[in-house]
Amino acid sequence: MKTRFLFMVCLLLALTVGASACGSPAASAGQTLTLAPESALPDFVQDAPSQVKEAYRFAIANPDVLTFIPCYCGCGAVGHKSNLQCYIKATRPDGSIEFDNHAFG
């Protein structure tokens, strides 16, 4: 089940990157999705496969995107309201992030 979830996140990331690469600069103006630097990753993700690292980097840099994507792995039963909560438990007032290992696999 977690493998399917990770696959869906990676597929979403690939489609987003692919769609932006296919459009003209004028068509994609104002729509920039980035990845956070690897140095922003939590320790438990540092030695993970590249797809896991990229998914966490995407979540760190684009929380507003993942907030609107529902989770499909059944984690709603543990209180998750969006895909973002599979990666990030909380963002503290000082801006630091408390990560969730749910999406780690």
Image (spheres, rainbow, N blue to C red):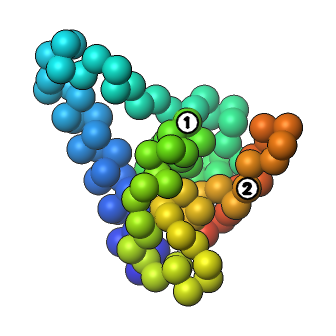
Which picture quadrant has residue 85?
bottom right
- Quarter of the image where the C terminus is located: bottom right
Task: Please give the residue where the numbered disc 1 appears in the rendered image.
Answer: 61
Disc number for residue 90: 2
Residue appearing at x 36%, y 52% in the figure: 10
- Quarter of the image where the N terminus is located: bottom left
Q: Residue 75: x, y in percent? A: 52, 79
Q: Does residue 9 appear in this view?
A: yes
Crowding around mark 1 (Cα neighbors within 10 Å: few <14, some 14 to 19, many 20+) is: some
Q: In the orientation shown, which residue stands out farthest toward the right?
A: 94
Which picture quadrant has residue 7?
bottom left
Residue 72's place in the image compared with 44, above or below, is below
Q: Is residue 71 left or right of residue 37?
A: left
Residue 75's place in the image compared with 57, above or below, is below
Q: Residue 29: x, y in percent? A: 28, 17
Crowding around mark 2 (Cα neighbors within 10 Å: few <14, some 14 to 19, many 20+) is: some
Q: Secondary structure at mark 1?
A: helix
Q: In the orientation shown, which residue stands out farthest toward the top?
A: 26
Q: Nearer the viewer, residue 20 or 3?
A: 20
Q: Residue 74: x, y in percent? A: 46, 82
Residue 38's place in the image compared with 2, above or below, is above
Q: Which badge, 1 or 2, is on the more N-terminal residue?
A: 1
Amino acid at dot 1? Ala
Q: Secondary structure at mark 2?
A: strand
Q: Nearer the viewer, residue 95 or 5?
A: 95
Residue appearing at x 50%, y 44% in the figure: 64
- Between the residue at mark 1 and the residue at mark 2, the CA separation in whole angstroms equals 14 Å
Residue appearing at x 34%, y 45% in the figure: 13
Q: Is residue 101 left or right of residue 52?
A: right
